[in-house]
Amino acid sequence: MAETTTPPATLDITIPVPVQVLRDLLVTAAEGGSNYWARISVPPDQTGADYTAIRVREHSAHSDKPPVNRIVRAEDLIEGLRKLTTATFPAASKHLTDAITENSDATTADVVLQMAVFGDVIYG
């Protein structure tokens, strides 16, 4: 008799993420978390350390595509967090938890930025 496979159960959870958490992740990525793979600049209309957007320029292409050169808004990082919910690398859940509980560091900010920009962790 053939075994039947039961599909896994799913759990959909909505977690509110304050915009300030996203801004803090953006600042942390810009101020050191992602500088090893990207040149990051702040648009001239922003002052202080509460960035709403940054320009991310990849040092060199990681594939046959041109290097990334784009503006990333704080709100764009929510996509990085979404992608972390299904990421399979070992520290994905730790970075997701650290980000949403406001316990992030430079590595977490870098991971969230890479997930938002590339959909995966390419560097580091």
Image: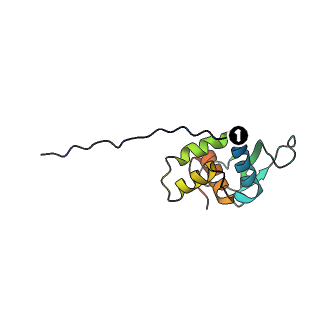
Q: Residue 75's x, y, as percent?
A: 68, 39
80 up-or-down from 93: above or below: above
Tell me what residue is drawn at x 69 percent, y 44 percent: 22
Query: Does residue 86 appear to the left or right of 44 in the view shown?
Result: left
Q: Residue 83's x, y, as percent?
A: 55, 45
Tell me what residue is drawn at x 63 percent, y 46 percent: 117
Tell me what residue is drawn at x 87 percent, y 40 percent: 45
Q: Which amino acid does label 1 sit on?
A: Val
For the C terminus, which image quadrant?
Answer: bottom right
Counting other residues with Cα less than 10 Å from the Cα at mark 1, is it few (<14), some (14-19), or many (20 or more)? some
29 up-or-down from 6: above or below: below
- Is residue 73 visible in this depiction of the protein? no
Mark 1 falls on what kind of element?
Answer: helix
- Judge by depth and name the residue closer to the eye, 17 or 31: 17
98 up-or-down from 8: above or below: below
Query: Does residue 47 appear to the left or right of 35 in the view shown?
Result: right
- Judge by depth and name the residue closer to the eye, 48 or 111: 48
Q: Residue 33's x, y, as percent?
A: 70, 58
- Is residue 97 visible in this depiction of the protein? yes
Quarter of image, res 32: bottom right
| Residue on which the image places disc 1 | 19
**Number of numbered tags placed on the structure image:** 1
Which residue is situated farthest in the left direction here? 1
- Judge by depth and name the residue closer to the eye, 61 or 20: 20
Query: Does residue 106 appear to the left or right of 84 in the view shown?
Result: right
Colour scheme of the picture: rainbow
